[in-house]
Amino acid sequence: MNEHRPRVAVITGGASGIGLATARRLQQHDWSVVIGDINEASAERALASLDAARAAFVRTDVTREQDIVALLSAAQTRFGGLEGMVNNAGIPGAFGAITEIEVQEWDYTIAVLLRSVFLGIKHAARAFKAAGHGGAIVNVASVAGLSGGVGPQAYSAAKAAVISLTKTTAVELAADGVRVNAVAPGPVLTPILGASPGRQERAAEMLKSTQPWPQPGGPEDIAAGIAFLASSDARFITGETLVIDGGQTAAGPLESMSRLSDPRAKHIAGVDRGSTGQAPTKRTTNSDGGDTDAQRRERGGPPVQP
């Protein structure tokens, strides 16, 4: 991509955390940014922290194809083009014992974390091909997609699929000048980790126990990797996943999912909707990891068999 012409990037989940840090970082490198997010209140705060002349927001449900199409169209209409796509939107998603995760909780998690990336790649690639100048797609995966025991089951499965999808589409789109890469963050201080103001110190101490590097990572560290992969400095890089985790993967997790914080140890299950502004759901399961008979009957399921 020509680094001297105005560049435009779309960032899903751009209203907070890694997405907002990426928007700020790209603006520092003369990009205009359009953030797609379902949380309008967060998006208003995000826009106030950006250069308003080079930023826009479109309310987006990343699981809906028509919303992704509208988001990319808005970027092209507002700023006259599209050169970058950052598929960042994410949630913690379904949690609990695998025997107790509801199908709708699993499907919701996969839709937000994986279907959204498929839709972002599909329609960004169409826009890049139509414009005839290529482009850069960066997907946000996770170290949870590289090994077991790091994250919840649905989240980890979706992130592993994002890494695979990054490789296959990079091969497919290379002839069109479209690069597809991913970043795989380790745990960082973002709202999705519950590291809201007032809880930063506790979260930082927890993160330092999982990695060799002495300081916890933040959204800005991941944004730097995304900005590099979107730039012409990475013009010969495609199909790669850049791990940004303070050495956690290199060392092996120094402390896997803590039994003190693991929802399976607390006998709870449900779904965490992250920074969407939508409330989580949570239910208690019995001591052997299954729902109580009353809870199963309440959901129309059979009682536990002896």
Image (cartoon, rainbow, N blue to C red):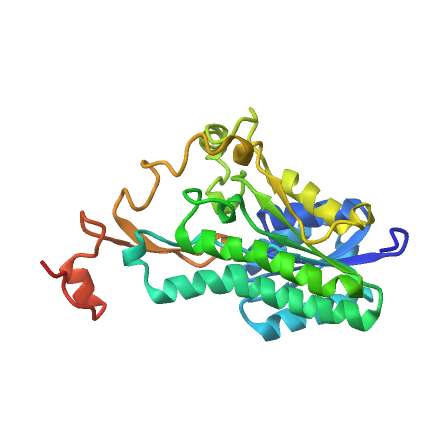
- On the image, which quarter does residue 67 sit in? bottom right
In percent of the image, x 87 and y 51: which residue is there? 3
Residue 65 locus on image (x, y percent)? 59, 73
Work out which quarter of the rendered image holds the N terminus and state it: bottom right
Residue 272 locus on image (x, y percent)? 41, 54
Q: Is residue 284 above or below residue 70?
A: above
Among all residues in the image, which is located at the extreme right? 4
Among all residues in the image, which is located at the extreme top? 214
Work out which quarter of the rendered image holds the C terminus and state it: bottom left
Q: Is residue 82 visible?
A: no
Q: Is residue 275 visible?
A: yes
Residue 115 locus on image (x, y percent)? 54, 66
Among all residues in the image, which is located at the extreme bottom? 66
Q: How many marks?
A: 0
Q: Nearer the viewer, residue 264 or 250?
A: 250
Q: Nearer the viewer, residue 266 or 54?
A: 266
On the rendered structure, is 161 left or right of 80? left
Q: Is residue 124 above or below residue 212?
A: below
Residue 21 locus on image (x, y percent)? 65, 45
Q: Is residue 185 above or below residue 213?
A: below
In percent of the image, x 35 and y 39: which residue is there? 261
Among all residues in the image, which is located at the extreme left? 306
- On the image, which quarter does residue 206 sit in? top left
On the rendered structure, is 195 left or right of 268? right
Q: Nearer the viewer, residue 162 or 204?
A: 162
In percent of the image, x 53 and y 44: which residue is there? 143
On the rendered structure, is 90 left or right of 231? left
